[in-house]
Amino acid sequence: MKNIFLTVILCYILSFSFGQSATDSAFNTQLQTIRQQVADIDGNPLISNTPLAGSLMWGAFNGNCIYILETKTLLKLECYFDDSTAGKKTFYYKDDKLIKVVDKEITYYYIHYLRDKEGNPINRSIERDLLFFSDQIKKLAIQLL
């Protein structure tokens, strides 16, 4: 009887150590959706691009605004900053909402808040800066379209 009880408890404990949490599973599902949306954006034959230049909190930048020509729906913004410490930032949008950020070759996914590739929340001050800049650059790009 003792062996059966210990076996049941051991199986129960092992199920938690090898199983994937519901949160991880939901993140992975959303991550796959975002990756597919980004692939669709990058491979879309109906897109056009417009050069973009301006100055925001990270300084002066040049960029590329990628959008669907017919509807002028914003899909992707690439920004190259004159200040080398700010680097290159790329923002992906789906239905006018941010879905992915690549900041100096570090990828973040927007699923209720910015997360790293493992699904962990990023530093709040970095998130706040990136979300603010994403919003500002999007407004600037929409004015150009």
Image (tube, rainbow, N blue to C red):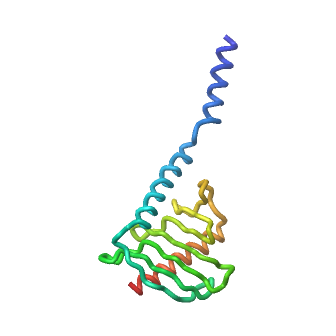
In the rendered view, would you say 82 is above or below 43? below
The structure residue drawn at horizontal position 57% and vertical position 85%, both measured from the top left corner, is: 61
Front-most of residues 111 and 105: 105
Residue 54 spot, x, y in % from top left: 53, 89
User: Residue 18 location in percent, x, y?
Assistant: 62, 35
**Residue found 48% across the figure and 53% down from its top:** 32
Which of 66/95 is in front? 66
Assign the C terminus to one quadrant of the image: bottom left
Q: Residue placed at 38% from the left, 67% from the top?
A: 44
In the rendered view, tell whether residue 115 sits above or below residue 12: below
Q: Is residue 19 above or below residue 111?
A: above
Q: Is residue 3 above or below residue 124?
A: above
Residue at the farthest top position: 1
Task: Name the image quarter holding the N terminus.
Answer: top right
Residue 121: quarter of image:
bottom right
Residue 85 occupies quadrant: bottom right
In the rendered picture of this protein, how many numbered marks are placed on residues? 0
Q: Position of residue 123 (x, y in %)?
A: 66, 65
Q: Is residue 40 left or right of residue 133?
A: left
**Where does the image place residue 143, in percent across and percent down from the top left?**
41, 86
- Work out which residue is located at the far left of the displayed protein and give it: 70
